[in-house]
């Protein structure tokens, strides 16, 4: 997705990767708030919870300490819930956190079902072929 020199640069400078991710994360939270208000903050919380869960297994060394990249996204969760609580009350912040948790559970179930389906049907998959820039996955029971 990114040019190789950018990937190499951030691989060598993990602290800068952390700082860039932090600014992008908090910046997106601010943009969502400015565009959509309360609903934007609720979306930011749900998105940050998903990103924290997806980035959780990725370990990095920041300032000499090994940590997960997922912890970066908790800063925007804290920020968004704090803004929600201050401007719209504690109930709105609690509701946003519950919504984020529900989204996280739904994504967990959907990804588990997708993995289960892939493992169940794994013997029916052919290799993924590249055809005219489009990934085509052939099933043996559909294509003879």
Image (tube, helix red, strand yellow):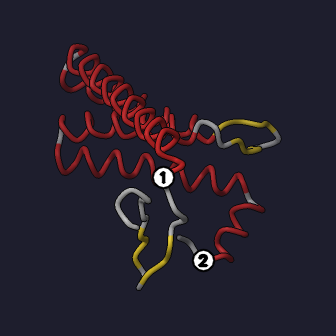
Residue extending furthest toward the bottom: 132
User: Nearest the camera: 97 or 27?
Assistant: 97
Residue mark closest to the camera, 1 vs 2: 1
- Residue at horizontal 51%, vertical 34%? 53
In the structure shown, which secondary structural element does the residue marked by tag 2 occupy? loop
Q: Where residue 127 appears, x then y in whole percent? A: 55, 65
Q: Position of residue 4 (x, y in %)?
A: 66, 76
At x 34%, y 45%, the residue is: 29
- In this rendering, would 56 be left or right of 40? right
Q: Nearer the viewer, residue 50 or 95?
A: 50
Question: In which quadrant of the rendered view does residue 17 lie?
Answer: bottom right
Residue at label 1? Answer: 124
State the mark number for residue 3.
2
How far from the left and from the top, in percent, is residue 39?
18, 37
Give the CA distance from mark 1 to mark 2. Answer: 35 Å
Q: Is residue 54 left or right of residue 10?
A: left
Residue 32 position (above or below residue 87) = below
Secondary element under disc 1, as helix, strand or loop, is helix
**Is residue 104 shown above or below 7?**
above
């Amino acid at each position: 997705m990114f040019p190789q020199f950018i990937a190499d640069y951030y691989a060598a400078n993990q602290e800068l990767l952390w700082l860039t991710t932090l600014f992008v994360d908090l910046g997106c939270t601010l943009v969502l708030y400015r565009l959509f208000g309360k609903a934007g903050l609720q979306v930011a919380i749900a998105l940050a919870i998903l990103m924290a869960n997806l980035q959780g297994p990725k370990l990095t060394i920041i300032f000499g300490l090994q940590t997960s990249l997922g912890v970066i996204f908790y800063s925007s969760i804290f920020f968004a819930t704090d803004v929600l609580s201050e401007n719209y009350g504690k109930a709105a912040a609690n509701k946003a956190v519950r919504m984020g948790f529900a989204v996280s559970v739904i994504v967990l179930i959907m990804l588990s079902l997708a993995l289960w389906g892939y493992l169940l049907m794994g013997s029916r998959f052919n290799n993924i072929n590249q055809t005219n820039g489009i990934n085509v996955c052939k099933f043996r029971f559909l294509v003879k």
